[in-house]
Image (cartoon, rainbow, N blue to C red):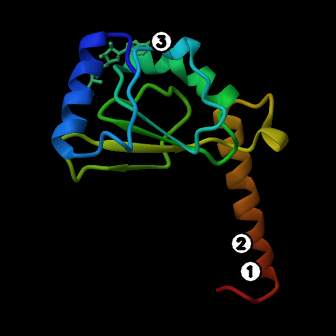
């Protein structure tokens, strides 16, 4: 989706060239009006400030563990990407939506800190039981 009709015309022309018109659909739409609830993966190519506006909607609507993949820009603030690869023209980053049930109401930094605490506790427990050096 894109709010600029010309971008959708370009996308349709590219799909035709690639022979995939039956498998993709592009729409002139404002992402503020779109529903993301059913998406397993959202791919975006948005400027940083626009991505920052989309972030709360993605976190509110996407299911836990859904993936967000962004080309070039990083506008998720303290929601850090799980991975960034630099194999293409631009860096490509991956974010994974945290579990809402357990982590609702926490900031992304708090969620990350809690996960680290749980990981360290597991390592310590295994060390103490002699399972790990
Ligand atoms: C970095 S450009 C990407 C252009 C094009 N999609 C491409 O892949 O080359 C960002 C695009 O986001 C679109 N955009 C900005 N705000 C939007 C919104 N609220 N809903 C949908 N598209 C939006 C702009 O129209 C612009 O085309």
Residue 24 against residue 125 in the figure, above or below = above
**Label 2 neighbourhood size at 10 Å, few (<14), some (14-19), many (20+)?**
some
Image location (x, y in percent) of residue 96: 57, 45
> Badge 2 is on which residue?
123
Is the residue marked by circle 1 packed among few (<14), some (14-19), or many (20+) residues within 10 Å? Answer: few
- Give the percent coordinates (x, y) of residue 53: 51, 14
* Residue at 25 percent of width and 37 percent of height: 15
Report the image quarter containing ligand 1.
top left
Residue ranking furthest to the bottom: 130
- Quarter of the image with the N terminus is top left
Q: Position of residue 41 (x, y in %)?
A: 52, 43
Residue topped by disc 3 = 30
Mark 2, secondary structure of its residue: helix
- Is 58 left, or right, of 14 in this rendering? right
Q: Which label sits in the foreground, 1 or 3? A: 3
Report whether the residue tagged 3 is closer than 8 Å to ligand 1. Answer: yes
Residue at 64% in and 37% down: 38
Disc 1 target residue: 127
The quarter of the displayed image where residue 37 is located: top right
Residue at screen point 47% across, 12% down: 30
Q: Quadrant of residue 129?
A: bottom right
**Mark linked to residue 26:** none
Report whether 99 appears left or right of 8. Answer: right
Tell me how far mark 2 sits from mark 3, CA to CA: 46 Å
Q: Which mark is first along the chain, 3 or 1? A: 3
Dot 2 or dot 3, earlier in sequence:
3
The reply to whether dot 1 and dot 2 touch (C-beta < 8 Å) is yes
């Amino acid at each position: 989706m894109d709010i600029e009709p010309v971008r959708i015309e370009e996308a349709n022309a590219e799909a035709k060239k690639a022979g995939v018109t039956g498998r993709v659909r592009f729409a002139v739409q404002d992402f503020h009006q779109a529903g993301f609830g059913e998406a397993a993966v959202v791919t975006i190519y948005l400027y940083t400030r626009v991505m920052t506006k989309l972030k709360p909607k993605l976190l509110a609507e996407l299911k836990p563990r859904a993936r967000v993949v962004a080309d070039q820009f990083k506008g998720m603030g303290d929601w850090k990407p799980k991975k960034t690869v630099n194999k293409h023209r631009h860096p490509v980053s991956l974010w994974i939506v945290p579990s809402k049930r357990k982590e609702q109401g926490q900031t992304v930094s708090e969620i990350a800190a809690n996960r680290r605490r749980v990981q360290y506790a597991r390592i310590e427990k295994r060390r103490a039981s002699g399972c790990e050096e």
